[in-house]
Amino acid sequence: MAKVTIAGCGIVGATIAYELSKSDLDVTVVDQQPAPVEPDLSVCPSATGAALGVLMGAISKKEKGNNLRMRLAGIQYYERTVPELEALTGLAIPFNRQGIVMLQFESDLSVWERLVGIREQQGWTLEIWQRDRLQQQFPFLNLDQVSAAVYSPHDRQVNPVALTRALIKAAKLNGATFKFNTSVRGATDQSVQTSNGDIASDYFIVSAGLGSTALTAALATPVDIRPVLGQAIEIRLKEPLCANCTLPVISGNDVHLVPLSETEYWIGATVEFPTEAGLSLPPDGAMFEAVMDQAIAFCPAIAQAETIRTWYGVRPRPQGRPAPIIETLPGHPHILLATGHYRNGVLLAPATAAKVRETILGS
């Protein structure tokens, strides 16, 4: 039985662990955090804990290519795997199947009109909604600056923390071992050295996000991954925006409004800000106010909402190359990189796990 050690237990590492645990492999996952993911924190130690879980597959502007294939594979994976995980583990995974509505503020929709046709040929649906339909379905929106919207019924939103916990529990049920509060100090093609002893390994998978740079530097083949800031807000309204209905994710001006219940929502930016640009950590109040102001601009009702919590995290972006990095480490055929997923770790984790599985098992 081949032994596989995975460094990092965010959504990517947990998905890899679950998929590999289905095969005849001895899987061990190590993570330096004391717990896999921690909700309700103002500072998220992992990108997974900071993420909103908005899965932008069909609504991506990418017309073709590997990244689009990975995105669409992620949507298909979660559609079948979320029920599978809930049945296997008994854990609930909040999963919004109402799609994504992306508000448009420009009158020229030619790019989207073209993409509607491309997606139809690919077997996916995109729709352009005019203002009258938006007003009818979402009377709480301010459409003064909105020209139309693009609706993607196949895209999804999933709770990243609940999903990761379910993946870990399922992998454990399949025989995988998890060692938290354990840091990796070095690795060879035969073993991984950790703060809690050596682990014999035939394959070592680096899925440690920002920690991947230090791990690969120790192997004399550093991969440059930089932190990118993201921040979010959880709010509670006194009255539902839409009574007795489940809303889709609504996105406008690069800000997502993510429904959790009839009165509770996450608000978060999709465009983060590199810390190398001089931004301080933690973010100051003005940065959270800017996110809230953008959301209020298209949904005025949330101006009266109660703020439950705010949080921020940093996400791993490869420097000078596309995200993510999924490849064998040069000079180390048994060390695999599965890292640097930037803003799309949740969405791209399934395709990443499939590629890792194929590298190890050939199928």
Image (cartoon, helix red, strand yellow):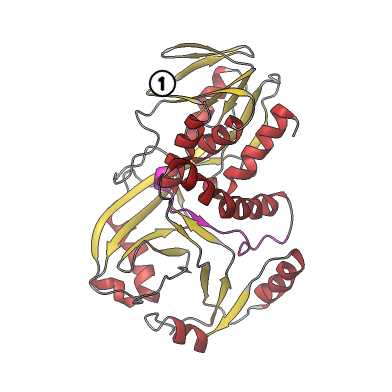
Q: Is residue 42 left or right of residue 150?
A: left
Residue 219 occupies quadrant = top right
Q: Position of residue 112 (x, y in %)?
A: 65, 73
Q: Nearer the viewer, residue 260 or 86?
A: 86
> Does the magenta run of residues contain 330?
no
Q: Position of residue 307 (x, y in %)?
A: 24, 60
Residue labelled with disc 1: 182
Q: Position of residue 195 (x, y in %)?
A: 42, 14
> Does the magenta run of residues contain 52?
yes
Residue 324 occupies quadrant = top right
Q: Is residue 158 above or below residue 199?
A: below
Classified by dominant secondary structure, the portion drawn in magenta counts as loop
* Residue drawn at x 64%, y 27% as measured from the top left: 336
Q: Which residues are magenta?
A: 49-63
Q: Amino acid at mark 1?
A: Thr
Q: Is residue 272 left or right of residue 72?
A: left
Q: Nearer the viewer, residue 275 or 348?
A: 348
Q: Nearer the viewer, residue 155 or 318?
A: 155
* Residue drawn at x 62%, y 76% as measured from the top left: 127
